[in-house]
Amino acid sequence: MEAAIGFPIRAPGNMTATAMPATSLDTTPDTAMVDAARAGDGEAFGHLYASYARMVHGILMARVPPDEVDDLMQDVFLAAFRKVHTLRDAAAFGPWLAMITRNRANDFHRHKPEMAELTEDIVAADRTEAEATAILALIQTLPDAYRETLVLRLVEGMTGPEIAERTGLTAASVRVNLHRGMKQLREKLGGRHE
Amino acid sequence: MSDAYLWDRSGEPDPEIQRLEDALGPLRAPQPPPEWRPQPKVHAIPVRGAWDARWRGAMAAGIALVLGASWLVSRPMGMGWKVARVEGAPFVGSRPIRTTGRLGVGEVLVTDGGSRAKLDVGEIGEVELEPNSRLRLVRAHRSDHRLALDHGILHAMIWAPPRLFSVETPAAVAVDFGCDYTLKVEDSGTTTLHVTMGWVGFEQDGHESWVPAGAECIRGAGKQPGTPYFVDASDAFRASLARLDFERDPTALDTVLALARPRDALTLWHLLPKTGGAAQGRVYERLAELRPQPAGVTRAGALSGDRQMLERWWDVLGYGDSSFWRIWKGPSPFAAK
């Protein structure tokens, strides 16, 4: 079922307020916030930012070096803030923001600056962070959809239903991507399952 | 083992997944995320874990801005700026821009009724020029990116530290503080600044207005300084303000004061040093009613144009700390008093 690796966008109409995850930071439906943001309401955009920060952070973390994520995240939300008035379907905000994020990550790789190599001393200076970075590097070798879904789940702590609701992927696709991505990650980690 | 834990953390926890969650925890986005502030991007030297610092506190912002400025001024600049045709047939001088071209210092970019163009502002932003516009590149220095809009409309999106980018118009100079804004210069010379994001200073002859996102400021053809206002103010409020600014109709002040909302403290704060006599006292009273003055601000001080007091008052209006406007230099809105 490799087809699930793509990004099948769920029909926006399926996104309803009742589908909001329990951990959402605001109970106001996103569509109302998007409508307000499109009308220039900065506070409404702030609510959207709070709701989607983890998704944007995770998508970037799946694609770029961790040290670059914060800067790129700011770029993504600035671009979204600037262009939100062009979004025709308020219910498609999540997939639209995810697309902006992926494009920004791609732009980064097209224009990325030369990176200095880390010495072992620097790496060893923070073993906890070094371990996290090493595991992330393994995840980043997985196919796009697997690594993005896995990072949203394992790094950002989002559940499968939340990932589907935020990114616009179908729940079935997220589930398959998580399953297959985790299987490949276990193999790379020399895991003992499956 | 079932996928239930992987899917939604239900069912029996998977020890390996738990170990991965723990190990990857340091990379997680801060929870809750920092407050959203549509601040412009500054080119600070990336510092691991600097998330909070960048989003909080004027001190950190100031450091980042200084670092960003240092970084920018140390970078070489090419010859002129890249121009791209958006539609129609824009010209640089007599050269038509079919796809892309360059605009050199002293050259003019012109669009007719059916053309539009986009201009890269060095590496710090971009400008889009609407039809029937004329734009000159005045300066392309690393520390001073300056355009002149003779007429027409431009949209600017700048992510540099404050004051590195400015646009001259016949009526005033728009000084960028990192933002997204539109400038419109009519054939009469009347200039309108509309700020979508961030902040812009609008300066002329030592008089500066501070215009935050959501607000506009108009300068008359004769360079009469208009007073900033939020575009969602009522039509009556805006019309009265225009009569006050450009027709010197003192009766218009009654309507402005009566219709002012707390948010319109922006307008009243700018009016305070522009008015005099009894009218100034009335502006003071209404401003204090809408946004009470903080400790240390006295009526006598505010009416005399005491800069420190007025800036302290500005700081409680909710449009950003006045120190932000002071990071580099520049006259205050009360400088002309």
Image (cartoon, coloured by chain):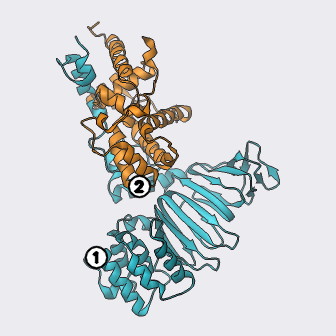
Chain ID at mark 2: A
**Above or below: residue B222 compared with residue B195:** below
Where is residue B112 drawn, in percent x and y?
A: 76, 56
Q: Residue at x 37, y 48 (%)?
A: A33
Farthest residue toward the right? B94
Q: Say which of B208 and B144 sits in front.
A: B208
> Which residue is disc 2 drawn over?
A41
Say if residue A189 shows up in the picture: yes
**Above or below: residue A137 compared with residue B72:** above
How many marks the image carries: the answer is 2
Say if residue B175 shows up in the picture: no
Are labels 2 and 1 assigned to the same chain? no
Where is residue A64 drawn, in percent x and y?
A: 44, 31
Q: Say which of A108 and B68 sits in front.
A: A108
Q: Amino acid at mark 1?
A: Pro
Q: Secondary structure at mark 2?
A: loop
Q: Amino acid at mark 2?
A: Asp
Residue A9 is drawn in which quadrant? Answer: top left
Q: Secondary structure at mark 1?
A: loop
Residue B105 is drawn in which quadrant? Answer: bottom right
Which chain is painted in orange? A
Quadrant for the N terminus of chain B in the image: top left
Q: Say which of A112 and B222 sits in front.
A: B222
> Which residue is disc 1 drawn over?
B292
